[in-house]
Image (cartoon, grey):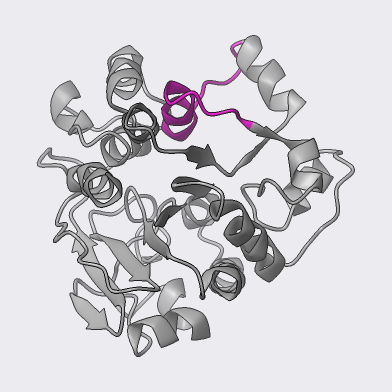
Amino acid sequence: MHMVMIFVDGFGLGGQDHNPIVAAKTPVLDELLGGHLLWGKRFITHNMTVLRALDPTLGVSGKPQSATGQTTLWTGINAAKALGFHLRAYPNQLLAEIIAEKSIFKQLADAGKTVMFANTFTDAYDQAVGTRKRKHTASTLSALAGGVRLRRVPDLMEGLAVYQDMTNAILVQLGEQVPIISAFEAGRHLGNLTLNYDFTLYEFFQTDVLGHKQLWNEAIGLVESLDSFIGGFLSVVEEENVAWILTSDHGNIEDFSVKGHTINPVPALCCSNQPLQWPEWDTLEEVTPGIIKLLT
């Protein structure tokens, strides 16, 4: 079985009001769920789709943040409790040590599984990290801990990687000579990639970016593009033994009545092409152990 995680940053399960996810047209997700239901704290089973609501607060007061939420998601260790607080943006030394030891990529690689991080990295990114103008995120640290080769623009040109905005538009703005593609085609690229690995991660964080900016129409369009991306992915894997989960680290884009992160639950949208007993996840820290159990 091939397992894929589509990680969507800042994507919570909010109410119906002030919610671009509810306002967006999402035919692919609607068909999976049996309705326009990717909102609210709910438990759904429909055909071979399961939706669970995960608590991102990790038992620590304050709004969930990326460094602790993502470290927890990709290690199974409650990073907020380890620190005693929620940490924004990039992992600190303690979280980096947790990732180095417990990364989902490392645990699966140690178990003999093949692992892949589908996102594209640029020379400019390498230079920024090398000069300490930026740090690796939890996802990148997790991949590196598992010995994963980071994919580059030449990989992208061969259809062997996906950029973080799906369409490559941001890459073009950065001066890279790459074609702009549709979200659907990007999803097809991810689908083809995943058939060569036991576990694949793709990270999409423009949802969190637009949630912070609170650009309503753009947010709706982004959610609709994400739906198309999933449609492209499914068009490739629908006849294969593939299971996948769409999840997040914290809420943001689902509630424009507040600015910034929310304490709303986040989805564990779980789908498979063959019958599968998904774990009964309730929190972020349960996800990595559950995936490892399914794959080993």
Left or right position of 285 against 112? left
Residue in the foreground of this view, choosing between 256 and 249: 249
Residue in the foreground of this view, choosing between 208 and 1: 1
Looking at the rendering, in which quadrant would you find the C terminus?
top left
Look at the picture and state if 125 lies above or below 260. Answer: above
Q: Which residues are magenta?
A: 132-150
Residue pictured at 58% horizontal, 44% vertical: 118
**Mark count:** 0
The spot of residue 130 in percent (x, y) is 64, 11
Q: Looking at the rendering, which quadrant does residue 29 occupy? A: bottom left
Left or right position of 112 against 73? right
Q: Is residue 94 visible in the rendered structure shown here? A: yes
Left or right position of 85 against 166? left
The spot of residue 73 in percent (x, y) is 29, 42
Look at the picture and state if 283 lies above or below 232. Answer: above
Residue in the foreground of this view, choosing between 3 and 184: 3
Residue pictured at 83% horizontal, 47% vertical: 172
Q: Residue furthest left?
A: 59
Left or right position of 192 against 53? right
The spot of residue 105 in percent (x, y) is 39, 33
Residue pictured at 34% horizontal, 12% vertical: 93
Q: Is residue 26 visible in the rendered structure shown here? A: no
